[in-house]
Image: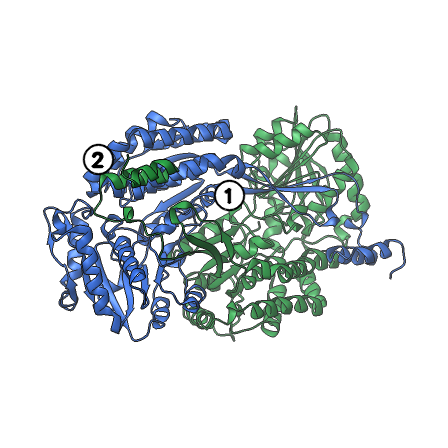
Amino acid sequence: MERLAESVAELRQTFKSGKTRSVGWRKNQLKALSELVRDNEEKFFEALYQDLGKHPVEAYRDEIGVVVKSVDCALSCVEKWAASKKASLPLLFFPSRAEVIPEPFGVVLIFGSWNFPISLVLDPLIGAISAGNAAILKPSDLAPACSYLLANLIPQYLDRNAVKVIEGGVDVSQQLLQQKWDKIFFTGSPSVGRIVMAAAAQHLTPVTLELGGKCPAIVDTISKTYDMKVTMKRIVGGKWGPCSGQACIGIDYLLVEEKFASFLIDSLQKILRRFYGENPRESKSICRIINNHHFMRLKSLMKDPLVADSIVHGGSFDEEKLFIEPTILLNPPLDSELMTGEIFGPLLPIITLNNIQESIEFINSRPKPLAIYAFTGDESFKKQIVAETSSGCVVFNDTMVQFICDTLPFGGVGQSGFGRYHGKYSFDTFSHEKSVLHRGFFPELEPRYPPWNDFKLKFIKLAYSFKYLELLLLLLGFKK
Amino acid sequence: MGEEQEDRKPASSAAAVFDAEAANGLVGELRGSFRSGRTRSYEWRVGQLKAIWRMCDEHEKDVVDALALDLSKPELESVVYELGMVKGSCKTALKELKHWVRPEKTKTGLATFPSSAEIVSEPLGVVLIISAWNYPVLLALDPVIGAIAAGNAVVLKPSEIAPATSSVLAKLVAKFLDCSSIRVVEGGVPETTALLAQKWDKIFYTGNGHVGRIVMAAAAKHLTPVVLELGGKCPVVVDSGINLQVATRRIIAGKWGSNNGQTCVSADYIITTKDYAPKLVDSLKKEIERFYGKKPLESKDISRIVNSNHFARLTKLVDEDKISDKIVYGGERDKDSLRISPTILVDVPQDSLIMNEEIFGPLLPILTVNKIEESFDLINSRPNPLAAYLFTNNKELKERFVMSVSAGGITINDITVHLAVHTLPFGGVGESGLGSYHGKFSFDAFSHKKAVLYRGFAGDATLRYPPYTKTKLRILKAFVTGDIWGAIRALLGWA
């Protein structure tokens, strides 16, 4: 605890010195971060394989590549982001000048998550550094190899007085939360999110909560064979592709018209075989479950006899290897745990509807998800989905790719969190927008000041409605 | 900002108690309304905004009377700083709304080619606005304008410390606005507690840091985002070599002329050099007398202290032993009329009460330093204020002040007026709060920015999918690093 307080104090000292504010420092750190990731690619692959059985391609696509791309984006934009923005002023304020200056919050705390143990720590860090903050990173202890690697590499590459990694579990997190931070960025579950925000409230610390939720994919009937094939690949890619379903923006369940369900299941099975072979247990292309606790949690989801009966594909598991086979379930009971909580694993329930339009009502009767996916060619249905549902984001005819769009804000709403990041939004998330108004001493408007009288009241009323002509008439005595 | 909800008044016995159950029913009703989609329509929003404008226009006198009862607020202050600002916000929102609601098209990169993307502003749902007593009209209705513009259903809880205004607001809102979606709940701590136990989609609170913490902790239970508009000790740095008369008058207008110092962006204390302090004090005295006469306690142009609790709090600040001899001007008070005259203190010790809490009243301490640059450290050694001000003609000093002082907002050579510029975000940092509003920022504060990405089926790259291979890794790397030739080479099997 004391050591921790010392670390925070050291960072605060660094921040106070003004060092982290200079754009030069920020760029240097971003370059160093880029080097860190590029130099140690193999080590990251190894650690990710150890923690999650993540294949290097997946590791690069979802973690290393994401960081490389974000750093490049920040490096090329940070000067522009950090510059002050002019704000327009009404004539009444003439001669004045107004601007909004982004300034760093100070010392920030970033909690990573175990499913993308590298990118979900380093991606927010890029924002924190770009904005000129000092930061403490707390990687998830559930991915110990990655946590250890980060704790080792960060001090070798980044400014030790401004960026630190603190490893540990719940007790360390609790101690961290007792400190005063200028911003807390948390990725994880809603239940821990509540604890983080309650702790932040003690110090009035702003928070960003990146949570998850049950992300649905609406699958409309698509007539073209090619489009249908792509759809199936993207569904499989969006369910089992990212960390075997252990992803906050992974597909949680599918919504489809009843008549289309059996075709959908057949097609998914075909793709699954193509991607992971006849025996997915041997496939190197799919992650394992993070730990025994989550393995047992997922296993127990399938225990419910009504749920077990609904399995139409897969369903096998290997406790020793912490492997669960890609599993498809058709119409499991809606009140089962599988359908009330976030699955966060390789189980894919398919819910059938009479009409695909009903999916909107279905989604709206549940907490707001982080993402809604919809495969459809129907433009009016697209419009309806955007206008009538609420979620962090909506993606049409694809899955997951919104995560790598630097121009799109990434973040939840309602149960899926609040605050946003990526690209410029990461910078904004770690910046305070300071308003600055510059005034001269001349001219001075006498009616601003007491003692009050009717003339002054009239004058100010006109000024407030920007009626300059009438104002002039009043001043010249032509108006009563 | 001042203490909200400190003196509990017994709920009137006749009225039904507003408890958690009643609050739950109310939220349920509004949620139904929101779900029906009525508040999302552009026409509804415009209709409600116009109604607020009309409400302020047609009932100017009722509002002015209520403010006179609650705070003895001079008519001009009520009309200009409260109703005028609200009407201005309505006008801005009405004029700009069609731009605000329009989805923002964004570029998409090579990684998701071909695709298009936009950011859609959607209402958060049912929101709670808790306002303060010092500007009981403005601080209630200004956020409501943002909430309505963004298409939300709203519950407004005006401050019970300004009871006449609270009651007028309740009456007028019920009369002018759509009561299926916009409601006022009057009351104090029990009612607020009942409201805070509910699940909201946003809570917007104006008040003090103590209650701000309670609000945010309550919001945490439901993962509700909050905006906290708090206050803090806003410093005014006065350099020498300026047009002293203009500076002095602007300071007075922003201190005593703004609800008698009971304003979150008012001047809390002044820092000036030892040499310049006597001139500044003389000028302040002279201009105060010109504004409020020889007997400021009797001036009609200055608000009174809101209630006896605050009166007692303020007198305790000036009566502290170590500062009683620091008063150089004013200090008169009248307990019966709740008035304290404009009071200036020079060189109060740093550890005095008055320098360690937000004053929020007509007392103005002046701290002196040897060199004006020392003021920066003095300010930065304290919690971040909501606003910081500097009067100077020195360009370099201005620049350094702007860069090194952290505050919600900064105005150079004037005070409080940045609040009236709707193109500037208004909000605090650190102890002075989080989140911002005014103009488009109000709309954004009550909106969720939904990312929408449209993809076609063409251009599906197999390298995204398993089974994963070394070649896929190479191509992927080439793409991410923008190495197009590398990607093509790898695709053609040359790499």
Chain letter of the residue carrying label 1: B
Is residue B387 shown left or right of residue B106? right
Choose between B106 and B419: the one closer to the eye. Answer: B106
Q: How many marks?
A: 2
Q: Position of residue B437 (x, y in %)?
A: 56, 52
Quarter of the image with the C terminus of chain A is bottom right
Residue A313 in the image, given as x and y percentages of width and height: 15, 62
**Residue under the image location 56 percent in, 37 percent down:** A83
Indicate left or right for A330 with B204 as reference.
left
Q: Nearer the viewer, residue A13 or B471?
A: B471
Check disc 2 and give the amino acid type: Glu
Residue at 69 percent of width and 69 percent of height: B59
Judged from the image, the secondary structure of the residue bearing numbered disc 1 is helix
Q: Which residue is labeled 2 in the image?
A: A46
Q: Mark 1 points at which residue?
A: B431
Tell which chain the image draws in green.
Answer: B
Residue B449 drawn at (x, y percent) = 47, 55
Q: Name above or below for residue A343 compared with residue B42.
A: above
Q: How far apart are marks 2 and 1 (CA)?
A: 44 Å
Query: What is the chain identity of the residue bearing mark 2?
Result: A
Looking at the rendering, in which quadrant would you find the N terminus of chain A? top left
| Disc 2: CA contacts within 10 A as few (<14), some (14-19) or many (>=20) | some
User: Can residue A176 be seen from the camera position used here?
Assistant: no
* Disc 1 residue type (three-letter): Glu
Q: The chain shown in blue is which? A: A
Nearer mark to the viewer, of 2 and 1: 2
Q: In this view, does A389 lie above or below B458?
A: below
Q: In this view, does A426 lie above or below B279?
A: below
Q: In this view, does A34 lie to the left or right of A316?
A: right
